[in-house]
Image: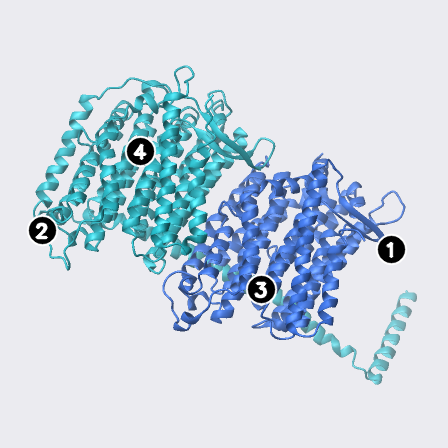
Amino acid sequence: MDFLTLFIVIPIITMIGIVLVRDTKQVKIVSAVGMTLQLINSAILIIMFLLQRSAGNIAEILFIKDVVWYPSLNIHYFVGVDGVSVAMLGLTSIVIFAGIFASWEVKDLTKEFFISLILLSTGVYGFFISLDLFTMFLFYEVAVIPMYLLIGIWGSGPRHYSAMKLTLMLMGGSAFILVGLLGLYFNSNPTGGPLTFDLIHISKIHIPLNIQLFFFPFLFLGFGVLGALYPFHTWSPDGHASAPTAVSMLHAGVLMKLGGYGCYRVAVFLLPDAAHQLGWIFLILTTISVIYGAFGAIWQKDLKYINAYSSVSHCGLVLFAILMFNKTAMNGAIIQMISHGIMTALFFALIGMIYGRTHTRLINEMGGLMKVMPFLAVAYVIGGLASLGLPGFSGFVAEMTIFFGAFQHPDVFHRVVTIIACSSIVVTAVYILRVVGILLMGKIRNDHFLEIRDAKWHEKLSVGVLIFGITAIGLAPLWLSDMINNGLTPIITRLLAAVQ
Amino acid sequence: MITFSYTVFIVLIPFILFLLLGFFGNKFKPVVSGIIGTTGLFTSFLLSCYTAWQYFFVVPKVGGAFVKLIGYNITWLRFTENLHVDLGVLLDPISVMMLIVITTVSFMVHLYSIGYMKGEKGFERFFAFLSLFSFAMLGLVIATNIFQMYIFWELVGVSSYLLIGFYYEKDTAVAASKKAFIVTRFADLGFLIGILILSVTTKTFDFITLTDPKGPALMQGGSILFMGLSTMTWSMIFVFMGGAGKSAMFPLHIWLPDAMEGPTPVSALIHAATMVVAGVFLVARMFPIYVISAPAALEVVAYVGGFTSLFAAVIACTQFDIKRVLAYSTMSQIGYMMLALGVSGYGGHEGLGYMASMFHLFTHAFFKALLFLGAGAIIHAVHSNYMNEMGGLRKYLPITHATFLIACLAIAGIPPFAGFFSKDEILAAAFEHNKILWAVEYAVAGLTAFYMFRLYFSVFWGKEVHYHHTPHEAPLVMTIPLMLLAAGSIFAGFIPFQNLVTSDGLPFVKEIELSIAIPSVFIALLGIVIATIFYRKETTLPEKLAKGLGGFYRAAFHKFYFDELYLFITKKIIFNHISTPIAWFDRHIVDGGMNGVSFVTNQVSDKIKRFQSGQLQQYAWVFVSGAIALALAFIYYWTL
């Protein structure tokens, strides 16, 4: 078996293990072991990848494995990674690892909960390693479906409504994506010969402009829905508010990145001419996302809503940077995906832990929590500072790479929207400090809070891993940036060719 | 060849201290944290002194001028081939001078805080934050490129935020910290835009390349960008916006007075001596670009500085909180420094303003830190911030009194104290370039002397106040820093800055111009005399004067209503008229649209679901009538 397939096999074995064991404690141990293995696996993958690169292996895709699994439509199990997918796999492993420990205290249907959670992560892993569009789409659906169950069964508040809304909107996106993928498939061999879903193959051919123009919006919007593109973002606040902690973490941390990654890897990479022609429309939408999300977050009173709107703003920046079509900005987009993934997972984990103690998520009902739970409070401040782009944390690296990349664009329109997007750093500071001020500082408003205990060991582990992630990238970003940069060469070459 | 790679430790020691105290501080006894922090900073201080000695006296000059040296450099992040962010140590006269200033004041403040913060909750947290700040500030001044400066610029901002909000259970402190961060963040947006423009125009971040006479920044022609100003001018104006925010220049000054909510040693270190002069340092760092490529931006610097110095001095005369008086005084003095840069030329005696600005920055650090630490000793003794609740303290606090008096004389510009020399240079530079600003600064010199001695007499002389318990002098650990800084305030003026820190690195000759110096001393003395009459003994004169000035006094007392204005903009306009409607729009229009789609789908399916009723008669009826209808239609078309 090849190395990348391990990323799918390990979760499957873990799920089988969960089915076999008896009590909830064993379920948790099996899940924890499985996801720890995934984390180690990702670390090994990153090291192996970097070693291959430094050994001078300049192949576009490494660790390729190609097996036909449905010959009549020429569908392959075709996997391989470049710098970008390696980074995304690392992100997934960190978030799922932290997610397992954050849901250590799930009481109802523990077995089913962990199975769904790990099934979701399997879909995500599969999505990031696939290079066959159909297989990729399959894994995408695997990732989206368990979400319905996870929110509908283990959620809180109006969970049925939220689960239905989220699933339907994402399914709507899927329908768009499917149309786009079929469009690519039927145009994958203009000279005659077998049609294919092979992403690398399609990236080497030229699809006629009118076909590109027709299918690009389907793909970009389809993936954009998952990436919280304005105005298709409203599933996000409701979905997050109802979802249990680990699900919010995985959803905002990883699943939303599928959208950004899809826009980058499929929509823009395969249809570069259309991207150039239609990019400005989506650029306006993403700029709106960035500012609108940030202003929307200022007003909110529920911690999860605040974070959901903040995610709209940050994820908007991802799509914004992808649409700048240059290497620096795209690099920033990928770093932003990773940075936001870890950061937002951290936030949702902390919100879940705070909620577990105070039984409210409304900031006005809390206050002075710094005094009673210093560990969680300090972690929240760190998350907040990372989110508002403080140097030393990953958010700064990502945002600066995006802004400096985007501003390199010679066009005035692009520079103006860059400056508009830049101004989000101020608005972000406003809503973050507002929450920190009300929630953690000041005096304790409720005497019951005096009996609150600080974090337990599994919560510390979960939070600690995520904080380690954002500071590691924030302090030493060069290796990550270089690794991603390498993987961007094909798309940039293709986009440059599209201009001429 | 002398290597300066050890200079990296000047910066790294405080960072290591921060990690040590931040993670393990609660494991030690509080005083141990204090001693560790202080020792660490003392090491940094010694290294800085050694660096200064090496740099100024040992390293050979090139053509008589001090050279810019790179002590250490690594690449931290790469944007494009040319644009890469390095982290390193750049040594030139101003960065070496700043190393001395920061490590000296920081060391003094660390020492002082062992006494001042004794028994406070979070003692080790305080020292951890102080170390973090020292790290960030040192990193800022030794930056080799503008992006490194921006990185540390943000870090000093956050350490300032953390320290202002140190008493996090106090609502005013939390609000003040938030305000400070957001206002400076807004200014930093300008800084960022400035760097963006600069980076695409010059394709570099590096200071040595940027300030190189043959470099891309200085060779820029007058290409017009927007509103008749060139690209470089716009970029420098935006960069100055960042500097103005950090240095509390009008109209971005509103955070500084509120920042006094932080512990007093913090005010001394961050909001008087070091961080708030970062803006001045920034302009000085980019000075060749300002003076050669962007003279219009330099005008802006001069006028903003001049106006702020007057504006703040007027407000300072009306405040009663001693720390706020000092805060406004700081703004006013920084205004002086900005103005000096603004009226300076480049090279030789033309660069007098530049040298004067740096000189004033240097001397101001000593006497302002001393004033704040003295204020801390006073507050420590009487547990109040308000000078109208004080009086006659000279008997109880002899050391504080003596050192405070020295600092007051220094800031008022009385020879031979330090402030006299640096202020005189600024006035001379202003006289040569801009007569209006020169006149303004004379007025400010008088006001400065007045408000400082108003403070001095109100606290140490004036009415006899009956205190709850007898005030007592601070412990030695607090008074030793006072005495050392007082020595600095007396002697710092004799340092020959014209030989060390100049705009082009070449020494030049300057003398004290009596025609400037004598009137300025007289104006200062006049201010002192008026203050003596008003406040030496308790009189009703101040109230009469306040009444006489009427509306103007009230406006000044309320800081010209700028807080209210900002509150109006943020609360009323942004919160109520932007954010709330967006949130509403999102819930009702965007989300409502989505729900509408599902509603319509639901309704339609509800309507059409009757087609599949399962009743055979209905199906048969539809089938037969459909067949007949089709048959009729076909017949109709065929017979045509």
Q: Is residue B17 left or right of residue B425?
A: right
Query: Of tags 3 and 1, which is closer to the observer?
Result: 3
- What separation in Å lies between label 2 and label 1 (alpha carbons)? 97 Å
In-front residue for pair B370/A336: B370
Query: Of tags 4 and 3, which is closer to the observer?
Result: 3
* Numbered badge on residue B361: 4
Q: Residues within 10 Å of mark 2 (few under 14, many from 20)?
A: many
Quickly name the residue at label 2: B463
- What separation in Å lies between label 4 and label 3 (alpha carbons)? 51 Å
Residue A258 coordinates in the image, percent (x, y):
67, 54
Amino acid residing under circle 1? Leu
Q: How crowded is mark 3: few (under 14 residues within 10 Å), some or many (20 or more)?
A: many
Screen quadrant of the C terminus of chain B: bottom right
Residue B498 coordinates in the image, percent (x, y):
31, 22
Amino acid residing under circle 4? Leu
In the displayed structure, B167 sits above or below B288; it is below
In-front residue for pair B282/B64: B64
Residue at image point 28% right, 23% down? B496
Q: Which chain carries label 2?
A: B
Q: Colour of chain A?
A: blue
Do the residues bearing badges 3 and 1 touch, measured as CB atoms within 8 Å?
no
Quickly name the residue at label 3: A102
